[in-house]
Each structure stands twice: as structure tokens, then as C-alpha cells.
Amino acid sequence: MLLNIKNLHLEIGGKEIIKGLNLGINKGEVHAIMGPNGTGKSTLAAAITGREGYDVTKGEIVYKGIDILEMPPEDRAKEGIFLSFQYPVEIPGVSMTNFMRTAMNEHLEYQGKNPIPATDFLKRMDEKKKIVEIHSKLTNRSVNEGFSGGEKKKNEIFQMAMLEPTLSILDETDSGLDIDALRIVANGVNTLKTSENAFIIITHYQRLLDYIEPDFVHVLYDGQIVKSGGKDLAIELEEKGYDWIKQENENY
Amino acid sequence: MSKKNNILDEVTQGEYKYGFVTDIETETAPKGLTEDTIRFISGKKKEPEFMLEFRLKAFRHWQKLKEPTWAHISHPPIDYQDIIYYAAPKKKKELESLDQVDPDLLETFKKLGISLEEQKRLSGVAVDAVIDSVSVKTTFQDTLSKHGIIFCSFSEAVTNHPDLVKKHMGSVVPYTDNYFAALNSSVFSDGSFCYIPKGVRCPIELSTYFRINAANTGQFERTLIIAEDDSYVSYMEGCTAPMRDENQLHAAIVEIVAMNNAEVKYSTVQNWYPGNKDGVGGIYNFVTKRGMCKGTNSKIAWTQVETGSAITWKYPSCILLGNNSIGEFYSVAVTNNHQQADTGSKMIHIGKNTKSTIISKGISAGFSNNSYRGLVKITKRAGNSRNFSQCDSLLLGDKCGAHTFPYIKADNKSSVIEHEATTSKISDDQLFYCNQRGISTENAIGLIVNGYAKEVLSQLPMEFAVEAQKLLQIMLEGSVG
Ligand SMILES: Nc1ncnc2c1ncn2[C@@H]1O[C@H](COP(=O)(O)OP(=O)(O)O)[C@@H](O)[C@H]1O
Ligand SMILES: [Mg+2]
């Protein structure tokens, strides 16, 4: 199993947000996580990627056979965990190119390899930009600065393509995208998908799942996975809405 | 995250990287400052009469002055009678090549990563190395003298070019200018002298590495750069200093004169011992740097990267006397732990159509205080003059301070002054975003800080820019987390 989350409990500032969550993911799988706002989807992503201030009080996150809870976020990244941020961050003054090259070289160093030569790097940038159809001018700008919402999301997928992670988490990458951008993002994911990697797609809507076919769909509610199923579950959710889940969970 | 705390501890407990002392026998003046001290220094240096006179006048003036208190800094009182005002490496025989230089000295340079051989061979930079106030070795003299360029120690200039020294010394920074200028004028030990004749573009970057070495010895460098009509020179100054417990006083003067159409670029990377993490020790750095754009169309540009010293008090300035002359000031000042920096620039517009630019980037971390203090003055006759000032502050953590004191005096309606200021912080979100891409916190800070300071760093000569980038990152390691 690539990722195995067992009985995860997590607090932010003393308040429990994740309340005993279990999730297992194998290589080659796509898992969709759905659920209403504020139920802990982004928090789960933060826990997996190791964000500071998200205190795991119980349980474990086992990735590639090791418990990664003590691993700093940059090492988790270099072990192949990637997060497409729900709200990508602007870093003024740091060019996308410089940022990406620094990131790539840190990955390479971690793997005991030499830094990527500038020409190879630029070639790789050009290749990967095509996957998400982003303009060259964007990579000359500072990281996410002055990018539109859609451009930011495409830029996340571009970075994913550059780093070729093993486990990618897409946190509402689809929200705020028009249908063209949505198609481009989905296409990017489908291009990058292999039998050796896995995806967690966090989304509100079934829309994205028309383009990226999930193997499993989980419903996250109040810090727990309350329902799991196949692709059909997403369709059912779309039809019935989340109230159905809420009622079901408040009744038992 | 426990790892982060380890890094923080490691770095904040780490000691100054360049803190070591070389053991070179020094010949020192007795402690204290009297007319006798001045006669001792002047005698040691076998100076002509006019120089002794200059020193004595300055000293008599200094005695009437009080140390200024207006800067946003604080320190225990300096006992000027408890300082040794002269120390020189013991004279050995005249040196013809680097092989003859004191091996200890060469070792010092190697530790600093600035071996003279390498400088000579690789970068084509002429180096006038000043250790403990006396020039040890000057290189590339041949190339320079072919162009009629004089680049030597100040003492040598006093001996060999007394007329030039007499004419220009004190013409930009008179000894009456301020307390520390008067002090320097009385006791200056040595420094650099540079003369670019009419019509000459200096083909190499002139570079001086200063280094404070003997315990308890105040350093009083004096630099004079003269660029005649239609000439150009780029001058670099950089330094690191050994670890010390006592505070070391440093009060330098740099004077630049630019004649018609002349251009002088003066770049500094300053990395003196800042004191330990509790703020003990470190260099007190009180510097008067000023350029005079004397000729029409002349240009003087100051670029500085200030990372060291316990206290920095420094306002590289331009007097724009010639019509159409240009003054520029680009600065990155970093303070960490308990460092204090009060720095900025003065642009005095006197000629018509004069232009000045001030780009100041302050970075504060730890418990430090970082102040920008600037004066833009446009006189009545300086019609159509322009100034643009940009003063940015970047804060790392919430125990440090950033302050801006811009003073503007415009006596002229046809002139335009623009001032912009911003304050920003490196956010946890930015750091986590970098971490999530595999970039360590240190490297993330390096990226962000260098991005922030890019406008200034890009003004530096190439090899200096690379050095400065590394320095910024090293300075701030572990200051966020
Ligand atoms: N940094 C934070 N500080 C305090 N509370 C937070 C923080 N992040 C998330 N929360 C709280 O945790 C809960 C889950 O948030 P989140 O994981 O963002 O939900 P989702 O992504 O499912 O919309 C919410 O109640 C939210 O207010
Ligand atoms: Mg969310």
C-alpha cells in the first residue's frame, strides 16, 4: 500500500478537526474525496504534507511503508508527495523559473543526483508547460503573482508535471475553473497518471470526475470518512446533495 | 516540527563563520588619543608636514564636539581614551611577489575565500588588501599604470601624489562635517587612493578587502577616489572580521569626486562581526561616505549590502553640484539577533536637471532594529530636478523593528520628488508552499530574500552579487520557524 492512514486524530489550536480517519491507497489508484465545506478535506491534505500547527494527536500516516509523522514537509515532498494547493501562494520577487529549478535541484540532491543543467531544465519546462497549456510569460513572472485564478491552478498542475510525484493531492483544483481550464487540468492529470503513482482528488463537485475517472469515492464529513464507494457514489451525491449525508450521520 | 527547532538552535547557536584571529606581530600606539598620538601616527607614516597639520586641526575640532545621539541606535558609551589608534603589521623587507607575503596573512585570505593568487588569476581583479591599517600588497599595478590610473594605499598617495591628496582630501567630507569624520581626519590609519585620469575607462573592477585584526584597535580607513573628465571606474569594497568580545570602533571616510561626464560606481559588501547572538561584542561602524558630482553629466552610484556589525551608522550620499548630474543609492541592510542599523542616503540637488534614485531594502530578523534615514534636498537653483525613493522593509519574526525616517526639503517648484514605502513579512504560507515543493526553509528564505533584494543585488558586479546572495541567506538562516 502506498499510503495508509490509520485512525488519524488531528487538532488545530486545541480543536479536534480530524476524528479517527482511515484511508488506504495503492499505486495506480485515483481516490476522490468529497464532502461539504469545513469538514476537514484541506486539513487532511495538510496532515499528509506535514504542515506545521496541525497536531496529530493519535493514529499514523504510513507512506511507502514508513510512518511519516515526524518527517519534515520538505522531505515528504522529496519522497514524492505533492499538493496542488486550494489557494496557491504568491511569492513576490521569486521567478517561477528560479523557484522550480531550486525545487527540482533539492529533489535531485535528495536522490543523490547532480543538479539539472540549465539547458535540460529549460527544455523540461517547455515540455511540461505544453501539458497544461500555460503561456511562457507566466513562468517568467514571480510565483503566482498576478496570475488569474485559473492560471494559478494550471500552474499547480505544471509544477506537479515538473516534479513527477508518486502521490498527488489535488485540493479543489477544479473550483473556479471554466470548462476549458477544467479539461486542461484533467487532461494533465490523465497524462501523468501511471501504474506507479496515485492521486487524491479533493472536490466539491462531480464535474471534474467526468474527466478524471476515480477508482474510489469517499465522503468526508465532520472529520471522518463516513461513506466509501465507486464512481457511482459521486453521481449519487450530485443528485441527492450533502444533506443526505448529514442527515444519515446525525441519525445514528 | 522538531526538525525545524533543531535547525533554529543550530543556527542561532552557531558562531560567526569568519571569527578567527591571525597572529601577526603588530606595532601599536599606546592607548588613548592626544596630540602626541597624532604625532606618533604621522611620524610612523613619515608624513609630510601638511598632513600632520590637517590631522591636528581635525583633532582640535573633534575635541570640541560631542558624539551624536540622533540615530536610532543605542550602545554603551565609547571610551575614546581606551582605544589603540595605530597598529601595523611589523615591517618586513619590500615584497616583490606574493611568495614573499607573510604566510599567516595569505592563510587569512584563504580562510576568507579571497586568496590573492586566485583573485589575480581568475577574476582579473586588482586587490589592495588592507590588514590592520597598512596596505600589504597591491596587485595589477602594471595594467593600471598603463592607463595612467593610480590605485594605491592612502599612505603611498600622500608620499607619491601629495598634490592630488592636498587638493581633494576633505573637499567632499570636511573634517568639520561630523564627529566621526573629525575623529577619522585626526587619526586615520590608511586606506585606498584611486585616481582615474581624463578620458580613461578603468578596464578592471578595483577591489579592496578590509579586515580588522588586532584586538582593541579602532580602524580609521580613509578612501579618496577622483574621476577626471570623461572617466569611469567601478570600485568594490568588502570585508569580514574576526570574532571579538570587546566592541571595535570603526569610523571610515570615503570621498568621491566626479568631474564632467565622469562615472563612479562604488559597491560595498559589509560583513563585519555583528556580536554574538546575545548582542555582545561586534563592530561599531560609523562611516561617512559621500560623493560629489562636481562636473556636468557626472554620475555617482552607491550600492551597498550591509549584513555585519553590531551597529551600522552609514549614509552614503551624493552632492549633485554639476548640471544634469545623477546620484544613485541602492542598499540592502540586513539585521539579525541584536544588531542595529541606521542607514540611508542623502541626495543634495544643487545643479539643474539633476536626478537621484534611492532604493533601500531593509531586512530585519531576531531582535534587531533596522532604520532607513534619508534626506532629499532640492535647492532653489536645482530646477527640473527629480528624485525617486523606494524604501521597503521586510520583517522576519515579530520581535524585530523596521523604521523609516525620510526627510524631504524642496525649495523649487519645477522639481518632482516621489517616495514609496512598503513593509512586508515572510509568511508561514509562503514558507510552507516552498517546503511542499521540497525546498528547505533556509533555501526558501534565501529565495524570498534574494528576490526581495534583487533590484539592489543586480547593481553589484557579478562576482560580488553571487557572494552577497550567499551572505544574505547565511545571515538569516534559522530566523523564521
Ligand atoms: N489554520 C486553521 N486554524 C483554525 N481552524 C482551522 C484552520 N484550518 C482549518 N480550520 C478549521 O478546520 C475545519 C476544517 O477546515 P478545512 O479542512 O479547511 O475544510 P474543507 O477543506 O473540508 O472545506 C474548519 O472548521 C475550519 O474552520
Ligand atoms: Mg478546503
Image: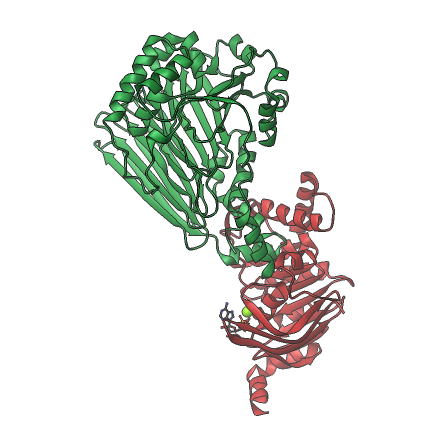
Q: Nearer the viewer, residue A128 or B369?
A: B369
Left or right: B258 with respect to A183? left
x 32%, y 30%: residue: B347
x 39%, y 12%: residue: B43
The way the protein has been coloured in the rendering is by chain
Q: Chain B is shown in which shade?
A: green
Residue B104 point in image, percent of width and height: 60, 25
Residue B148 point in image, percent of width and height: 48, 9
Q: Nearer the viewer, residue B179 or A83?
A: B179
Can residue A189 be seen here? yes
Q: Nearer the viewer, residue B249 or A112?
A: B249
Quick one: which residue is furthest to the bottom in this view?
A251
Q: Chain A is shown in which shade?
A: red
Can residue A39 be seen here? no
Which quadrant of the structure image shows residue B246?
Answer: top left
x 44%, y 25%: residue: B265
On screen, B443 above or below A149?
above
